[in-house]
Amino acid sequence: MTAVGIDAIEIRSGKLKLDLPNTFAPQKGDDPEKYTKGLGLNNSSFPDVYEDIVTMGANAAKSLMDRKGLVPADIGRIDVATESAFDHSKPVSTYIAGCLEQVYDDDFRHANKGERKFACVAGTQAIDDAYNWIKAGRHRGRAALVVATDTALYARGDPGEATQGAGAVAMLISEDPSIVELSTHQGYGSMDETDFLKPNQQFPSVDGKRSMQVYLARMREALEDYQSVAGKVHLDDFAYAPFHTPFPGMVRKAALLAYRHIIRDTEIEDDLAGEIGRQPREDDYEDREAYEAAIREHMDELKTTDAYQSWYADAVEPTLGLSREVGNWYTGSVHVARASALRDAIAKDRDFVGETLLVGSYGSGAQAEIHAETVREGWREEIEGLDIDAQLDARYDLSWEEYEDVHDVHEYDKDVEREIEEFTAPSEEFVFTGWGRMNERKYEYIA
Ligand code: CAA
């Protein structure tokens, strides 16, 4: 059977940075550790005045095409996943293709273009679409370009403001891929929820605490569904577990839940029983409330055990490295987590071709998806090609007043009367230049 999966990845960060402990926390009157330790975030990436989902997506896509030596004829499909689209009809993929056509000789008129929406899980769904298209044999030997791009902005003063971010991840999905092969097996947990939504509004309505509960519930269902088709998951089956990361603290909660679930009725639970007892079973309790209290107590103990902490340090913590520095990128977030894991494997000089990642995606509204990915021969070369460290180092560090200004610039309905200068100088990249005759957004390549 032909292997299908991710052949190349490029990451493009917004060019500005908001320092959470040093710039954001003092303004909110908060202890900086609420951000660095509680949420697990140091900085958010923010878009400069000439950046948006199209520029970041097109810049990531161009880097990917150039690094792989691709021309438009090599790409049969362009799918953009976003929850920050500014147009209810014309998909962002057409804008991105339009940008790319400014710099390549040929065009993308042959390519099937679309836009995928389901909050943050849409990036994974767009990869699925590409996978199915290739597996169905409809691709005529060509690859699919999937771009997950978002400006994850919240209304000023919303509790989510601390978890903002902006960036794009471009991925090439192909036969015989260099980085990872995707599993055929998948698990889903999907329910009609109103935890986080944007009904005809730019910034989300968020029930933050509930959104965290919904994330955990749907993720658990997705894991159960995945096991129903792939068989029971064991901890040593996979090297890393990259999960959707709205902020690292969320993944810390999800990881503990996943660990408890995975070790139940295994030797690991038996081994831990002497130290912290066996996991509470619902049948042993009079009511749900008593059972839940026992579970909470057990989890508090479980997270202090050496067994859990060493698994977390090996399989989960390394997936959070980039997220800590960029915040939430919505559709791109789980793909940033995968990249962090692969970068960790390089840092540890791991030879892990053939090893497996357990990937958990999540979108509010709400749906979780879990699948496995097997690392391929060319992974190291591809991941070594990423320039994300240089991008992060080059970000402009916003003062509080500058942050307020640039947030206003990106708010569609806000009449920004003062002219805001760009904070960084564009070079060799696509930039937003203003609105056209039909209210379309316009872009140019700056050489
Ligand atoms: N030192 C260390 N830790 C501290 C601290 C300090 N001084 N002060 C607070 N903390 C801890 C808190 O204990 C808490 O951790 P625990 O949950 O483990 O107890 C953490 O820091 C955050 O503190 P609060 O809960 O008080 O923070 P908050 O109420 O201001 O906001 C939030 C948290 C509700 C998640 C908010 O950021 C939010 O609404 N975010 C947007 C929604 C979101 O990201 N939801 C995640 C699931 S939905 C999803 O994943 C989709 C998506 O991408 C949006």
Image (cartoon, rainbow, N blue to C red):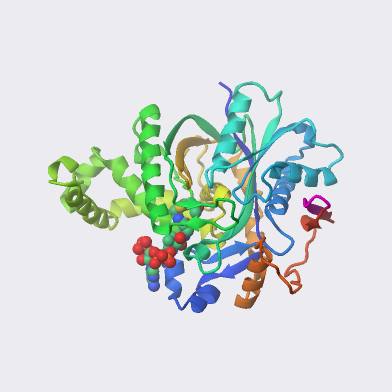
**In the depicted structure, whether residue 16 falls above or below residue 271:** below
Seen from the viewer's position, the closer of residues 413 and 235 is 413
Q: Is residue 419 left or right of residue 174?
A: right
Q: Is residue 247 visible?
A: no
Range shown magenta:
437-444
Q: Is residue 98 left or right of residue 324?
A: right
Q: Residue at x 50, y 34 (%)?
A: 354
Quarter containing ligand 1?
Answer: bottom left
Residue 104, horizontal then vertical, whole percent = 84, 42
Residue 175, horizontal then vertical, whole percent = 63, 28
Tell me where residue 65 sits by quadrant: top right
Tell me where residue 138 sits by quadrant: top right
The verdict on residue 440 being magenta is yes
**In the depicted structure, whether residue 377 falls above or below residue 216:** above
Q: Residue at x 39, y 54 (%)?
A: 210
Tell me where residue 425 sits by quadrant: bottom right
- Residue furthest toward the right? 105
Seen from the viewer's position, the closer of residues 14 and 116 is 116
Q: Is residue 121 visible?
A: yes
Q: Residue at x 84, y 46 (%)?
A: 102
Seen from the viewer's position, the closer of residues 360 and 372 is 360
Q: Residue at x 43, y 45 (%)?
A: 193
